[in-house]
Amino acid sequence: MRFRGHAHRSLDDKGRLILPPDFKDKILAEVPDGRLVLTIWEKHVIGISPAQWDRLEEELEKIKAPSRQMQNIIRIFYSGYEEVTVAKNGRIAIPAHLRKSGKLDKDIVVMGAGRRFEIWPAESFDALLEEDYDVSDELADNSVSLPF
C-alpha cells in the first residue's frame, strides 16, 4: 500500500475526517475490515495498517539498549496508538489525544507519504511547501538518480 497525493480537508465537530477516495480504496483493499492504526510520528498523526504496526513493533524490539532519545520515540509511538475503522464513505474519527498531539484543528491536509499517510494542520503543510531543500548530497551518497 503506497499513498500518494494530498487533499485539504476539514475536521467536523467530533474530530472526524473523510479520507481521499484513493486512500480509502487502498486501505480497504489491503485491510478489508477497514482497521487502521493512527499514531504520532515526527509531531504529526500518521496512518498505517495493523500489519505495518506489527512490523514496527518487531523492528523496535531489535534495539537491545535503546538510548533515551530512542526510548522517547518508542513512548511516543506506543502512547499515540489508536486503532480506528474506516467507514464505507472513508470517514475516520481522530481521537482527542491525537488531535491535540498533532495540533489538528479544523483545517487539515491528508497527504501521502509512501507506505503511510500523514495528517497535518493546513498551515504546517503550507510551511513545508515554502521551505527550500538541498538533498543533492544525500541523493548522491545513496546512488539515487532522479529520472527527471
Image (tube, helix red, strand yellow):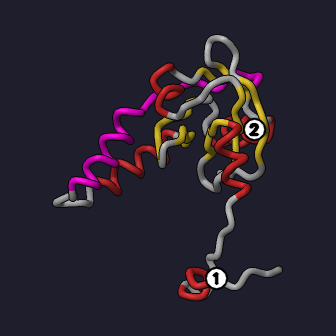
Which residue lies at the image location 64% right of the left edge and 36% below the top edge? 121
Q: Does the residue at mark 1 contact the one at mark 2 (Cβ under 8 Å)?
A: no
Say which mark, if any, is on residue 25: 2
Asked whether 73 falls inside the magenta stretch, the response is yes
Number of the front mark, 1 or 2: 1
**Which SS class for mark 2?**
helix
Count of numbered circles in the view: 2
Query: Which stretch is magenta?
Result: 68-91
- Give the residue type that dot 1 points to: Ser
Residue 93, above or below 60 = above
Name the one closer to the observer, 146 or 56. Answer: 146
Residue 12, above or below 132 = above
Say which mark, if any, is on residue 136: 1
Residue 107 on image: x %, y %:
72, 29
Decide: few, some or many residues near mark 2? Use Cα within 10 Å; few <14, some 14-19, many ≥20.
some
**Which SS class for mark 1?**
helix
Which quadrant of the figure has residue 87? top right
